Amino acid sequence: MLELKNIKLSYGNTQVLNGVDLSVNRGDVVSIIGPSGTGKTTLLKCINYLVKPSSGTIAFDQLHMDYAQADKKAIQAIRLRTAMVFQQFNVFKNMTVLQNVMDPLVVVQRKSQDEAREIALRELDRVGLSAKRDSYPSQLSGGQLQRTGIARALAVRPDVMLFDEPTSSLDPELVSEVLKVIKDVTSSGITSLLVTHEMQFAKNISNRIVFMDQGVVAADGSPAEIFDAPANPRLAQFLQTELAFH
Amino acid sequence: MIPELMTALPLTLVITFVALVAGFCLALITTTLRVVRIPILSSLAALYVSYARSVPVVLQLFVAFYGLPLLVAIFGMADFFTPTVAAMLGLSFYHGGYLSEVMRPAYLAVDRGQHDAADSLGYTFRQKMMGVVGPQAVHIALPGYGNALIYLTHNVALVMYIGAADVMATAHLIMERAYNQYQFETYLVLAVIYSIMCLIIWVIVRYFERRSPMYVPAVGRAKRVAMPSL
């Protein structure tokens, strides 16, 4: 369904992605783990072109794009088929919770106000935020903000959900409410890519784990292969540190 | 005295209004050029802003009054160049440059994540600017914009130096006619007139500041208490 080949990207002199290959099948829930600064978030942002790789290709079903000759039409087509949940929530600050979820439907997808409202209310109900629909972001907790972000992403009916460390900016007691919603989303069969440091959570909800190290995919396998019998010494070391910490 | 000053007030208001509208348009164009970074055009925009901000307003008015007629004379339009027109153009030019440096930081102050969220959802640049980034930038820019309007109103008083018959020029005329007997009283009336104009501007800007959704305070935010001095 989604295939990334030889993705390379650098910030100045720092090579962040060093030729990443990754393919995702429909219905997959893929967790991307790895040390900080290894390019996990950057890889996710390459998919919807929030950052521009210097080289590489992306294939999304029938759609192919070479990043060296990216065209607006292909970028827009990919963006309309993906939805991202951000580490810093990035909920639109000038809109209420309901408007946040409705706006992309009305502005981008050209749905009617009534239809957008109906979808938005359904998604807000799904993430347990119906009561907060008229609140502004400045009136919400971190967990509520992230659930708004998830509702907004779900409402556009994406083929692939991209979760970029959705719980990293939350207080520990707010993490569980967001993880519960993500678990509900991923178990509904929607294809998901999740960058996370929540190892146990990744193990429980994913059918595939990708370990990134120094800008490449260093290990790729089922949760059992990755967590219970890590073949890669760097992965073993990383898991030992992460699991000891948590 | 007051009725005579009032007859000149419409001209002051018209000059202010024209400079306000034209300056806003100029600032919008200049800010866009500086933010989007188009070679040559962006540099020219930066040069213009530098001129508008660094040259005293009264000098800018002189340049407009003495310089622009030479330019338009090429097209045979020198007669059209009255002091009032020069005042409007000179102040528009000044206000546009000044305002651009209110708009540009406001645009840059909008969190990068807001751009990312809109882009990732497929918003076009125009949709993003109109619906997401623009309203937030406006909220940030409002206090600075209020200041810019107040400075503009103050600077309209300088148009008398190029011969425009605004309230300031009229006040001088009244004082000279009375052999400079009532200078304090005349200036006091002028001060009240300018205070009222600035107060109206402040109230309008404040109204829009309060209307802005981002103004809603966070629930449970602790009351601000003064830090006790050590």
Image (spheres, grey):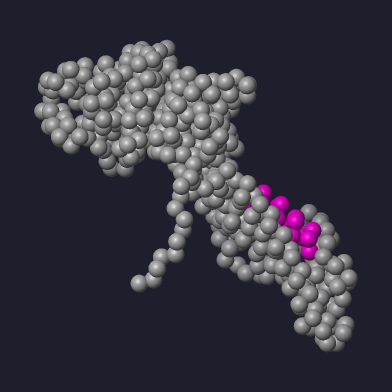
Left or right of A105 in this view: A209: left
Left or right of A20 in this view: B18: right
Answer yes or no: is residue A116 visible: yes
Give the quadrant of the C terminus of chain A.
Answer: top left
Residue at 33% x, 40% y: name it: A171
Residue A224 covered by magenta stretch? no
Give the quadrant of the N terminus of chain A.
Answer: top left
Instruction: Using the image as rendered, state which of residue A101 and residue B66 is in the foreground.
Output: A101
Residue at 26% x, 24% y: name it: A202
Where residue A60 sits, quadrant-wise, is top left
Where residue A14 sits, quadrant-wise, is top left
Q: Which residues are magenta?
A: B12-28
Rendered location of residue A5, percent (x, y): 30, 21
Where residue A146 sits, quadrant-wise, is top left
What secondary structure prevails in the magenta region?
helix
Q: Compared to B90, does B38 lie above or below?
A: above
Q: Compared to A207, does B30 lie above or below?
A: below
Instruction: Using the image as rendered, state which of residue A1 and residue B160 is in the foreground.
Output: A1
Rendered location of residue A241, percent (x, y): 15, 35
Rendered location of residue B212, percent (x, y): 60, 46
Residue at 23% x, 28% y: name it: A199
Left or right of B51 in this view: B21: right
Q: Compared to B224, does B107 lie above or below?
A: above
Instruction: Using the image as rendered, state which of residue A214 and residue A226 is in the foreground.
Output: A226
Residue at 62% x, 56% y: name it: B145
Rendered location of residue B150, percent (x, y): 66, 63
